[in-house]
Image (spheres, rainbow, N blue to C red):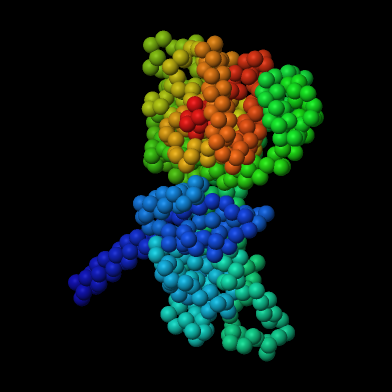
Amino acid sequence: MRFKIGFTVVLFSVWASISAFAQRNDQPVYTIYAGVFIETTAANFDAIRPLGFPYAVPSGNNMYRIYLGGFTNKSDADRNVQALRARGYQDAGVLELDPNRGQNVSVIQLDTKLLEKEIPWDSYSKFGRLNVILSDQNIKITTAVFPDINSAQAQLPAIRKMGFPDAFVKNVNSVFLHEINEFYPEAINTAPPPTNAGQANQTPRNVPANIPAPYDQPSNIPSSYNQPASIPPPSNVPAAYNQPTIAGPATLPVNNASLVPKPSIRSNIKRSSVTELQKILKDGGFYSSSLDGLYGKGTSGAYDKAVQANPQVEKYAFLAEQLPIKASTAQPGTLQYAIDNLADNPGVALPILQGSSLPVAKVYLAYYNLATGGPSQDVNNLMNSATLEAYAKAVRPPRTRFDYTSTYVFNDLSQILTPLAYVQVIANPEINTPCWLVQRHPKEAAYAFTPDAALPNANYKMPDCGGFTEWPEIRTLVRIAQDLNGGQLPDQKSVSAGQAQAMNYLAHPAALSDVEQKSADAWHSKMINGITGWASRDAMLVDMAGAFKLQYYQSYILLEDFYMNKGLKAAAAKGLAQSTLKALVGPYLTRFI
């Protein structure tokens, strides 16, 4: 008997493992982003449907983000992206669907159709709202989401009697559910939902009385269930999705202050950047005053009118909002990974930090303990011991701004950043500053990570945390530059290096050397001349080049004022503004240099 039971358990375990493996392999992991389109329907994408079932996510103002298919293999998605780009969809790219951003929900799967076949949407209209699960060539059609699996099981018999004998209940991660909305007008049941109150005998013909209201009343369903959670901008992702995956430790408090407040533009300084912007505005008929190089009300008003009148600027401003947030690329399980994820996922980060004896791990533990539990002797001990250990091996201890030989009491987070920075910049292995630290403490981090002459070989690199791309003008400029690259992807190392350089300029603004200034001037002239020459070949390119120049010179002027606010003189601010723009958009514009 023991053998039979054991054998049964083994068989069940093997079956469960095989089933789980098969389920994982059937899971659609990737989808294709095709672009943003205005006032469109699925019929307009029939020509590319063989590459993947098209679906849409509304973005407001009659705009839709269009996606294709669900792919279990990235190579298939990559191949179809290349086919899309060959057909003119230059914004096409592969996105990975992240189950961590969804949650398990219950639906009833009604049918499965092949991609190559037409779908008779009218046969499903009695169910109101529909979803699809896309897996390679298969389109799985489901009902709307039920409150729980028991509710779905209760309705299954009625649905089978309605002509769907093979329907079944399934649990699915909401990230893989895609709503069939007005993008498929033929699939939308425009009839008003039945009213059950006081009308028990007036149930519509052919519709069972116990079909739940949520089918036709999406207000009863969490809106997140019918949204592809890994695709919308971060602001649309339910806050609960960003909670620690391991219950227990508290997440760090959030500081919503801007990392880079946008400056007011000075109206009393003549500068060449303003003169160039005025030329563009005058050529477009938006500016009629003299080219005086002063950014007054006339220039400001003309710029606003030009932006509103340029559809390319409007388009790319919208697309810029869809730029992904940079995530940690560190190897899971490493100390860098733990530090990068301490703010949002302490359940994963803390065990790694607690298991490390390195001083840099201790200072981040001290930061976490102070942020979540307030001042304590434990915080003081961690910080003071870490700084002493970090510099203990130095043969000739450097004379730094921070006296690491003293013992401190830490009462607030601003106090902790300077010693934390000193421990981090000399850490071995090298540790990069996490974005969350810079975003929560922009001013303190900029000071703490300012290079100290006593530590010439320290790692003062700042990460790509958004920075200047918080400004709509620069965010839009970067998005236009990406398309000016002709669909060619730049070297990622160049992009990353440029982003890091821009962050360093932000944190440590300083006048360029003469050689650096000449290099920035030369790049600016060649780039502008190159884009002007390119646009002259075809009238259709003029609008795009005009949109780029509008955003470029406005960004140029804003950067000058930002650096002047940091104490630089106008000439030095000009050079640093040029060099910052080169760092941000230069990798995408090499074809024009």
Closest to the observer, 85 or 27: 85
- Horizontal side of 312 relative to 178 (left or right) equals right
The quarter of the displayed image where residue 307 is located? top right
Measuring from the top left, give residue 100's x and y in whole percent: 47, 53
Compared with 331, 562 (above or below) is above
Closest to the observer, 12 or 554: 554
Circle count: 0
Measuring from the top left, give residue 335's x and y in whole percent: 41, 35
Compared with 108, 62 (above or below) is above
Asked if residue 529 shows in the view, the reply is: yes
Compared with 268, 160 (above or below) is below
Measuring from the top left, give residue 440's x and y in whole percent: 60, 34
Residue at the (39%, 65%) spot, across then down: 137
Closest to the observer, 438 or 544: 544
Residue at the (70%, 23%) spot, across then down: 275
Asked if residue 410 shows in the view, the reply is: no
- Horizontal side of 449 relative to 77 (left or right) equals right
Measuring from the top left, give residue 159's x and y in whole percent: 51, 81
The quarter of the displayed image where residue 251 is located? top right
The N terminus, quarter of image:
bottom left
Outermost residue toward the bottom? 201
Residue at the (44%, 49%) spot, across then down: 86
Residue at the (63%, 58%) spot, across then down: 39
